[in-house]
Amino acid sequence: MKKRALVSVSDKQGIIEFVSGLIKHDFEVISTGGTYNLLKDAGLNVIGISEVTNFPEIMDGRVKTLHPSIHGGLLGVRSNEEHMRQMNELGIQPIDLVCVNLYPFKETIMKPDVTFEDAIENIDIGGPTMLRSAAKNHEFVSVVVDPTDYEVILAELAENNTVSITTNRRLAAKVFRHTAAYDSLISNYLTEQVGEENPESYTVTYELKQSLRYGENPHQKATFYRAPMPTVSSIAYAEQLHGKELSYNNINDANEALNIVREFSNPAVVAVKHMNPCGVGEGTTIEEAYDRAYTADPVSIFGGIIATNREVDAATAKKMHELFLEIIIAPSFSEEALEILTSKKNLRLLTVDLETKPSFAPKLTTVHGGLLRQDMDTFGLDDATVTVPTKRQPTEEEWENLKLGWKVVKHVKSNAIVLAKDHMTIGVGAGQMNRVGAAKIAIEQAGEKSNGAALASDAFFPMNDTVEAAAKAGITAIIQPGGSIKDEDSIKKADEYGIAMVFTGVRHFKH
């Protein structure tokens, strides 16, 4: 009896060559629908699915392979005498190879004008069922879901006239990953459609983007995966124009730089080191913004990651070229800027769409044995209920400093304090165990520049010591969430020194 293969694919890439190879290795090939027509038109001798099932394809092709003649042939255990007896009695012939890939559900829901009905029609039922049947019985059935595996199958058939159990097992595992990812996309789409916020189970899927040399440290293995749906303004979908491969730490820092630079509508430049901003500047041009970001902390920017929200021009590129930088991210680079910056072999240059407003997926954080999920912190000052509890209102200039500080402090590790002045950060206190400690670090970094600056805090003041420290440094305006039982102490201290203090009612913890 000839070996049998069942072939039914949406992705027709390489399928004619693959089936030709199977036929050369004495396979009888069963096929369905569009795949059958394609193979027939190519002059290949294939059998229609209805010839096997003795039942027509019905309901616009919704039902064609869901039949005992197919699944009996896939699931029958060849070493089980009772299985083989039943197959012989019922006239079910074994199927030795399955080549199936699925209806394009992802591609369908990516269309901007997709309807719910179109999405539902592109949920494959028969395909995953055949794949799962074949993968379960992989000791006897080879199953192929990925066109890149066609050559592997044909090579083993050419060498051994069979496919090894090792390969079958590897391909079976790949099938179950594939169907799990496919079902995850469908379940997430339907969950969103019905507005379920806390489903009883939560399944996500990501696609391999690249294997990394190592993780945060050389002894840690790491891999970079990206969401299957293309995501604008995302490091996962950035285009790399030049430089070495991104590392684990590069990816984390670059992601944080993008998160911060998205806060700004005016030309802005953000420098990041170890997941914290070390310098942020705004300007009327990107060159002016870069000058301010550099001036904010000319020491820490060395070896940092830069993100801009405007095209990098030649003048800015020349200044960037003077420094050792790991990455520069921008919406685009002028031809002159590219020529200047690509002279540095290892400097990574990335372009990212910053014009399209992104829709943010939930933030996922793993803990040992579990997963935390929360909304991304996209809350801005325009969303807040702003009050001024002090006697003095901020001046127009102070408001500008307060706004810049507030945009940045939400992206600094808690406890966080940011000092801002003259359209740039001048001091950043990050990740301290107490708030006044973070303030002292920021004030020390700013030095004399702190005179007349604004201070932004990611959370409320539990006591008035931070206001006291700010006043002694010459800071004239403070923005913080408020909400402490000792707010009145901080308000009185601010009034004592003539500081204008703004409450936002919103904290921005970042751990």
Image: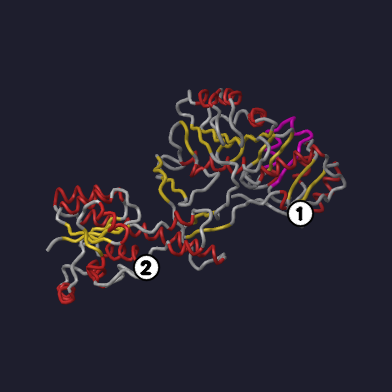
Q: Which residues are magenta?
A: 438-457
- Up the image or down, 263 lies above or below 36; here it is above
Q: Is residue 452 magenta?
A: yes
- Up the image or down, 486 lies above or below 54; here it is above
Name the residue: 22% across, 68% down. 52
**How far apart, in angstroms, are the residues tagged by discs 1 and 2?**
54 Å
What SS does tag 2 mark? loop
Instruction: Report whether 224 appears left or right of 285.
Output: left
Residue designated by label 1: 385
Q: Nearer the viewer, residue 120 or 141?
A: 120
Point out the image quarter for the N terminus.
bottom left
Q: Main secondary structure of the magenta part?
A: helix
Q: Position of residue 164 (x, y in %)?
A: 19, 54
Name the residue: 57% across, 43% down. 256
Q: Nearer the viewer, residue 141 or 80?
A: 141
Instruction: Report whether 80 appears left or right of 198.
Output: left
Indicate the amino acid at tag 2. Arg
- Up the image or down, 83 lies above or below 230; here it is below
Mark 2 crowd level (few <14, some 14–19, many ≥20, 10 Å Cα)? some
Q: Earlier in the sequence, mark 1 or mark 2?
A: 2
What SS does tag 1 mark? loop
**Number of disc labels:** 2
C-beta proximity under 8 Å, tags 1 and 2: no
Query: Based on the displayed image, in which of its 4 quarters is residue 263 positioned?
Result: top right
Q: Is residue 157 magenta?
A: no
Residue designated by label 2: 62
Indicate the amino acid at tag 1. Thr
Instruction: Report whether 378 appears left or right of 141.
Output: right
Q: Nearer the viewer, residue 272 or 431?
A: 272
Mark 1 crowd level (few <14, some 14–19, many ≥20, 10 Å Cα)? few
